[in-house]
Image (tube, rainbow, N blue to C red):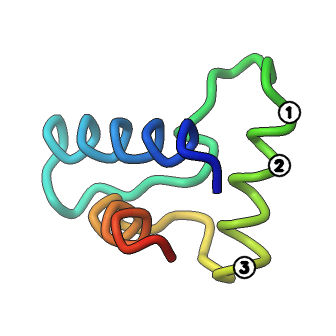
Amino acid sequence: MRAELRAKILAVCEQKIKAKGENVGVSFYAFFKNKNDDPEQLMEAATWWIQTHQLDHFVKARTIREMVENNL
């Protein structure tokens, strides 16, 4: 995963956790605007989320943060 996407995921997870607490869930769509302005990055996140890790649609933000921090 590109460093830019990792940084974006970590920032969004931190923001969501700060706003809604440790049990907040996110989907990979949380890292993108409603307008699909970067389809390559969206597909990279979707591939990591769905194909590589077979995650459910919503996962705890803290879990995603830990996975990204551990380069999974």
The amino acid sitting under disc 3 is Thr
Quadrant of the snapshot with the N terminus:
bottom right
Please name the amino acid that badge 2 sits on. Answer: Met
| Residue matched to label 2 | 43
Which residue is depicted at the point 86% across and 33% down? 39
Residue 4 appears in which quarter of the rendering? Answer: top right
Q: Which of the marked residues, 3 or 1, is nearer the chain's N terminus?
A: 1
In the rendered image, residue 52, in percent from the top left (x then y), is placed at 72, 79
Local SS, label 1: helix
Q: Percent position (x, y) of residue 53?
A: 64, 81
Residue occupying the point 75% across, 39% down = 41
Distance, label 2 to label 3, CA atoms, is: 12 Å
Q: Which residue is mark 3?
A: 52
Q: Quadrant of residue 59?
A: bottom left
Vertical placement of residue 49 versus 10, above or below:
below
Q: Which residue is mark 1?
A: 39
Q: Residues within 10 Å of mark 2 (few under 14, many from 20)?
A: few
